[in-house]
Amino acid sequence: MKLFIDTADVQEIRDAASLGLLDGVTTNPTLVARVGRPMREVLTEICEIVSGPVSGEVLATTYDEMLVEARELASIAPNIVVKIPLIADGLRAVKTLTQEGIKTNVTLCFSPIQAMLAAKAGATYISPFVGRLDDVGHEGMELVDQILEIYGNYEVDTQVLVASVRSPNHVLTAMRMGADVATIPFNVIGQLIKHPLTDVGLARFIEDGRKIKQEA
Ligand code: G3P
């Protein structure tokens, strides 16, 4: 499973990239607003750090305006993936952008039928938001399971990108289900690495290592 980071903070991206495990980046308008920089400037810098797919989202909600913005975003770098919201105009835009060879990530997916429609439009990625479903009392990962089943039934090429990830358990379940990608906030990437028994075990090895006699 590919691991993307879900942030617009370039320092977090540099730190995650230095691990050597980072396959790509996703951003959204909320994440870009949080860093207080213009969208184009941030995405340009991210594409200089990461050679894998970098998702940048359109702000427009009409077909014509989405196309203008999407082409503008796609001109930033060859690895830009344009994020498009899962609304009727968005699906139309995905179809056109796919014909133009522009990669898309269809975002704000909350149902398996929406996911199938995005695939039919030619989406490169579909982003089910698992954490936000959990927040309203649904089982977010159940949506991922259903999308994978449906895409498997029809040999769909669209990649399932698990988004709105809040915990290592989301990542584990995504891996077990065979999702293509999980996009993970920086703090959760840290949680994936750490285990208390690793820390306890290492402390013991360091302590015992000091007792080993050195050769004369
Ligand atoms: O980037 C889309 C998604 O990952 C947002 O996550 O935590 O705002 O629901 P969250």
Image (cartoon, rainbow, N blue to C red):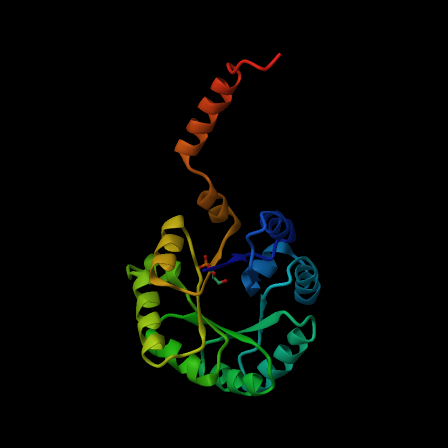
122 in relation to 78, above or below: below
Classify the position of the C terminus by image quarter: top right
Quarter occupied by residue 165: bottom left
* Picture mark count: 0
Write the residue at 36% across / 50% down: 169
Classify the position of the N terminus by image quarter: bottom left
Q: Residue furthest front?
A: 216
Residue 91 appears at what percent x and percent y? 47, 83
Quarter occupied by residue 115: bottom left
- The front one of 197 and 165 is 197
Write the residue at 44% across / 59% down: 164
Residue 80 appears at what percent x and percent y? 62, 70
10 in relation to 111, above or below: above
| Left or right: 152 as drawn, with respect to 127 | left
Write the residue at 57% across / 84% down: 97
| Left or right: 133 as drawn, with respect to 99 | left
Residue 150 appears at what percent x and percent y? 32, 76
| Left or right: 26 as drawn, with respect to 79 | left
Quarter occupied by residue 69: bottom right
- The front one of 59 and 201 is 201
Residue 213 appears at what percent x and percent y? 54, 13
Write the residue at 60% across / 86% down: 100
